Every structure is written in structure tokens, then in C-alpha cells.
Image (cartoon, rainbow, N blue to C red):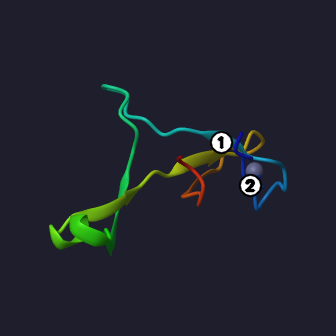
Amino acid sequence: MPTETQRRCPDCGVAMERVTPVTSVDGEVLRLRTDEPKKGILGSLGLKETVQPYGYVCPECGLVRFYVDADGES
Ligand SMILES: [Zn+2]
């Protein structure tokens, strides 16, 4: 079982709740495309790496931050 990364609100110092950003229309997970090309044969085809960010919401002040966790998806 992966261990969730603990994020803390920079203003309140409380633990932020992790949420999965999805679109309201069809529930697709938000993805970010990086400028780093994929390695190997996919990179030679010009495909770019995509990563999945997670949202972190502060329950105190409502601050939202996005992080790409290194082990966010497996
Ligand atoms: Zn806060």
C-alpha cells in the first residue's frame, strides 16, 4: 500500500487533504504534459511524458495546491 505524502498548508500548518482533480463533464483525470520526451521508442515517435497531479486542499483556509507526487500513480 503506498504511503500518502503529507502536505501541510503554508499558512495554517495543518495537514492538507489530498483530492483527485477530475473534470465535471466526464470525470476524466486531469493530466499535465511535460516537455520531457518519453524514453525509448515512444520518445522517438515524439510522444511527451504526461503526469498526474493531485490537489491538496487546506481544510482551514481552503487553499488549493497541486503536486505531482513521485509515486502518485503505479
Ligand atoms: Zn490553510
Q: Residue at x 77, y 52 (%)?
A: 6
On the image, the x and y values in percent for residue 64 come to 60, 49
Gap between marks 1 and 2, in whole Å?
8 Å
**Callout 1 touching callout 2 (CB < 8 Å):** yes
Name the residue carrying label 1. 18
Rendered location of residue 53, percent (x, y): 50, 52
Mark 1 is on which residue type?
A: Arg
Instruction: Choose the circle earlier in sequence order: 1 or 2.
Output: 2
Task: Tell which residue pokes out farthest to the front in this image.
Answer: 41
* Residue 22 point in image, percent of width and height: 43, 35
At a point 17% along the width and 69% down the height, the residue shown is 46
Residue 68, quarter of the rendered image:
bottom right
Give the quarter of the image for residue 48.
bottom left
The residue identified by callout 2 is 7
Residue 9 horizontal side relative to residue 34, left or right: right
Q: Residues within 10 Å of mark 1 (few under 14, many from 20)?
A: some
Q: Nearer the viewer, residue 12 or 74?
A: 74
Identify the secondary structure beneath mark 2: loop
* Residue in the image at 57% along x and 47% along y: 55
Residue 63 pos. (x, y %): 65, 50
Image point (38%, 50%), residue name? 31
In the image shown, does 2 or 34 lie closer to the viewer?
Answer: 2
